[in-house]
Image (cartoon, rainbow, N blue to C red):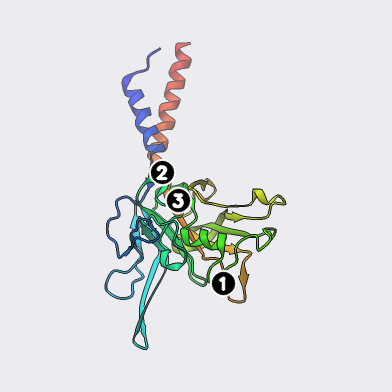
């Protein structure tokens, strides 16, 4: 039996409003604050680390309905200018060969997820909170995640006091994890509603051939944090000392998937249309 056009239209409208989704891929961001030059034969790229050109800045930045925390500091000591940042940066740097913090804005896969240009870098400095806020009416579903070049090469080879994972024998049960914690208020405040761990390197297997350092973009399910209004990132590592984690606490993020929270009116229309169709089907029988 063919249902009336009006009823079908109502059902389709309500359904489309209920399941609409978006992907934050950072491709629309075109304002950069620095350039990473060509090193080791690798192409460079550009990045934004919060340097607005007006000194210190803690305003953060936004993309696709998400707000990303950021703090940039420029200070001078004995005639020497120092710069530092924490939080989130975005980048299109492609270098996956140069070790050290001078290459801290590069994803190890060498591009964004799926070969795209832009991606985000999260850096959680001890004592600071690195977070993203999610607009009301949206829920987080998942994202793509990988190591940065800085972290990957430090995990593999050791750098600036960090150890190569597995140690000299390869038998050390090392683990490097990023934790994404959801909160019911902006700014990583309010009540924590849950958390999701992702192991960026895992050397705990009895068989060393199963040890790994993440070197490609991996999809991470965050549906357990769907109701979060903000998500904070933190890191743990077995390579730690009296001053904290020795492993560079960075991670690359791309393609953050969001779904729209259905409005009450949309749900009511969907329910009404479904009921009407069922009732008409019963009458037809």
Report if residue 19 is visible in the image.
Answer: yes
Report if residue 260 is visible in the image.
Answer: no
Task: Give the image location of residue 255, x and y in percent.
Answer: 41, 47
Q: Which mark is residue 266?
A: none
Q: Which mark is residue 114?
A: 2
Q: Nearer the viewer, residue 194 or 281?
A: 194
Secondary structure, mark 2, is helix
How far apart marks 1 and 2 lie (CA) works out to: 33 Å
Q: Which mark is residue 161?
A: 1
> Closer to the observer: label 3 or label 2?
3
Which quadrant would residue 66 be assigned to in this image?
bottom left
Q: Pointer 3 and pointer 2: residues touching (CB < 8 Å)?
A: no
Does residue 2 sit above or below 275 in this rendering?
Answer: above
**Residue at left offset 51%, top offset 61%:** 151
Q: Pointer 1 and pointer 3: residues touching (CB < 8 Å)?
A: no
Does residue 268 sit above or below 143 in this rendering?
Answer: above
Task: Give the image location of residue 44, x and y in percent.
Answer: 34, 58
Instruction: Give neighbour class at mark 1: few <14, some 14-19, many 20+ (Cα, 10 Å).
Output: few
Task: Give the image location of residue 184, x and y in percent.
Answer: 49, 57
Instruction: Give neighbour class at mark 2: few <14, some 14-19, many 20+ (Cα, 10 Å).
Output: few
Which quadrant would residue 202 be assigned to in this image?
bottom right
**232 displayed left or right of 44:** right
Q: Nearer the viewer, residue 199 or 275?
A: 199
How far apart marks 1 and 3 lie (CA) works out to: 24 Å
**Residue at left offset 41%, top offset 41%:** 262
Instruction: Give neighbour class at mark 3: few <14, some 14-19, many 20+ (Cα, 10 Å).
Output: many
Secondary structure, mark 1, is loop
Which quadrant would residue 157 be assigned to in this image?
bottom right
Look at mark 3 in the image and give the residue it sits on.
Answer: 109
**Pointer 3 or 2: first along the chain:** 3
Task: Give the image location of residue 188, x and y in percent.
Answer: 48, 63
Does residue 98 sit above or below 222 in this rendering?
Answer: below
């Amino acid at each position: 039996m063919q249902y009336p056009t009006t009823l079908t239209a109502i059902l389709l409208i309500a359904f489309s409003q209920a399941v609409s989704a978006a992907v934050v891929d950072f491709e629309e961001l075109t304002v950069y604050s620095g350039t990473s030059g060509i090193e080791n034969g690798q192409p460079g790229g550009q990045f934004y680390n919060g340097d607005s050109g007006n000194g210190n800045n803690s305003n953060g930045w936004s993309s696709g309905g998400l707000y990303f925390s950021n703090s940039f500091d420029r200070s001078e000591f004995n005639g020497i200018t120092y710069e530092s940042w924490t939080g989130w940066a975005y980048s299109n740097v492609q270098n996956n060969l140069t070790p050290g913090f001078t290459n801290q804005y590069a994803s190890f896969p060498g591009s964004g997820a799926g070969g795209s240009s832009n991606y985000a870098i999260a850096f959680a400095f001890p004592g600071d909170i690195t977070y993203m806020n999610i607009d009301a009416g949206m829920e987080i579903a998942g994202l793509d995640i990988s190591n940065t070049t800085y972290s990957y090469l430090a995990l593999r080879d050791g750098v600036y006091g960090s150890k190569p994972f597995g140690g000299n024998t390869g038998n050390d049960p090392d683990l490097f994890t990023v934790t994404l914690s959801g909160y019911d208020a902006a700014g990583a405040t309010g009540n924590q509603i849950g958390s999701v761990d992702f192991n960026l390197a895992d050397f705990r297997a009895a068989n060393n051939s199963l040890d790994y350092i993440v070197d490609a973009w991996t999809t991470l399910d965050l549906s357990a944090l769907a109701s979060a209004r903000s998500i904070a990132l933190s890191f743990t590592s077995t390579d730690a000392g009296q001053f904290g984690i020795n492993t560079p606490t960075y991670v690359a993020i791309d393609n953050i998937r969001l779904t729209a929270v259905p409005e009450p009116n949309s749900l009511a229309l969907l329910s009404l249309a479904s009921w009407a169709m069922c009732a008409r089907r019963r009458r037809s029988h």
